[in-house]
Image: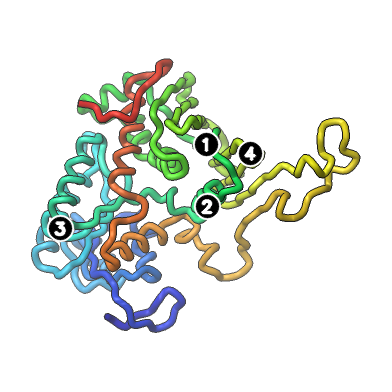
Amino acid sequence: MSVHIGFHGRLVDEPEIRAGFIGCGSHAFRNIYPTFQFAPVSLVATCDLDLARAKAFAAKFGAQAAYADYRAMLAREELDAVFIVVGYDERGRPLYPKIAADCLSAGRHVWMEKPPAATCAEIEAIEQAAEASGKVAMVGLKKMFFPANEKAKELISAPGFGRVQLALLQYPQYVPTQEELMRYFAGEKVSGAVGFLDHLCHPASLMVFLLGMPASLYYERSDNGAGAATFHFASGAVALLAFTHGSSRDGGMERTTLVSDSGSHVVVENNLRIRLHRSPPYETGTGYGSAPNYYTGAPGQATASWEPEFSLGQLYNKGLFLLGYYGEVNEFARAILEGRPPAKGTLRQAWQVTRIFEGFAAGPGKPIPLQERES
């Protein structure tokens, strides 16, 4: 046990994980390091190829040591876990697979940012390293941890909602051509494919979180790279993902709609505002041609809405919480402290998201199976 500042800003006596951090870039600075003030994480050491940057991050965020080589950090520091936020190599491949495997083999739990790999085979190698070490490995699939998306999941899982039969997801993403994807998988650095790998994680992981792994994919793309993908699920549900490349970023870039088979649907606007829509009971007189007054039904039978306020200095209206960063870091730390696997952001879910990415290389205009692993 250790005395430290807890979630509510008061001194608490509870365990924390001792963590090292590989990567001292702008994303980590804005969104991951700051979560440690709320999650049960004690930052011990930082690491970056630029030692001066690692030392600056250590001084800013309270670490006692800084390194330019993560292998030296693993050898010298007593760490429970390592956070990894790095980029791509010269071919546009994520750097995580080797670093994560090295950390796991050294007996450290691993949290890594998305995308963890360019191929499912690389994720399978990380899975093997995690299994051999008996350590937790988790991926920062933040859309699964957005409070708005967690609420949507709760609403569609309620007994009265019925079964989701249709999902509509909107995300402003460029869809590369089949030729771009094939060149990328052949080993060439292709910016359009790298960008697709980097950002497809968001809507794809949200879809997997809400509906599970799709069985098949069919997509079309427009001349400018906008497109639409249809996913079919073993449950009988269908999801449509609209890639709105070229659209305005003013007024919100994302929208999710989940339609049931029982007169209800959930809408998530801009990852912030949620509405649960329910049809008024038929017996209240709202049948076609017989409704002089539509304002019927009890409050529990009408539309419900949730949206945080921004007038008060609360945790719930801060970006670290609204955008899921605290949620994913806290889940990782709690999983380690409680000796259990993470509830979400798992390597299996990362494999599923990567399999969807790989599926697009089959090209538009044809059904693409997704469930089976490629040989």
Sequence-wise, the earlier of marks 3 and 1 is 3
Q: Which mark is residue 258?
A: none
Give the residue type at disc 2.
Answer: Glu
Can the viewer see residue 246 in this picture? yes
Q: Tell me where residue 338 sits by quadrant.
A: bottom left
Q: Mark 2 highlights which residue?
A: 154
Is 209 placed above or below 339 here?
above
Cα distance, mark 1 to mark 2? 18 Å
Q: Position of residue 309 (x, y in %)?
A: 62, 62
Q: Position of residue 374 (x, y in %)?
A: 24, 27
Circle 4 crowding by C-alpha within 10 Å: few under 14, some 14–19, many from 20? some
Q: Residue at x 18, y 67 (%)?
A: 79
Cα distance, mark 4 to mark 1? 20 Å
Sequence-wise, the earlier of marks 1 and 2 is 2
Query: Mark 2 touching mark 4, by CB under 8 A?
Result: no
Give the residue type at disc 1.
Answer: Leu
Camera-near label (3 vs 2) is 2
Furthest-right residue in this view: 292
Q: Mark 1 highlights which residue?
A: 169
Q: Mark 4 highlights which residue?
A: 262
Cα distance, mark 2 to mark 4? 16 Å
Quarter of the rendering occupied by the C terminus:
top left
Q: Mark 3 highlights which residue?
A: 70
Q: Residue at x 29, y 56 (%)?
A: 341
Q: Position of residue 203 (x, y in %)?
A: 45, 39
Cα distance, mark 3 to mark 2? 40 Å
Secondary element under disc 2, as helix, strand or loop, is: helix
Taking 182 as reference, is 306 left or right?
right
Camera-near label (4 vs 1) is 4
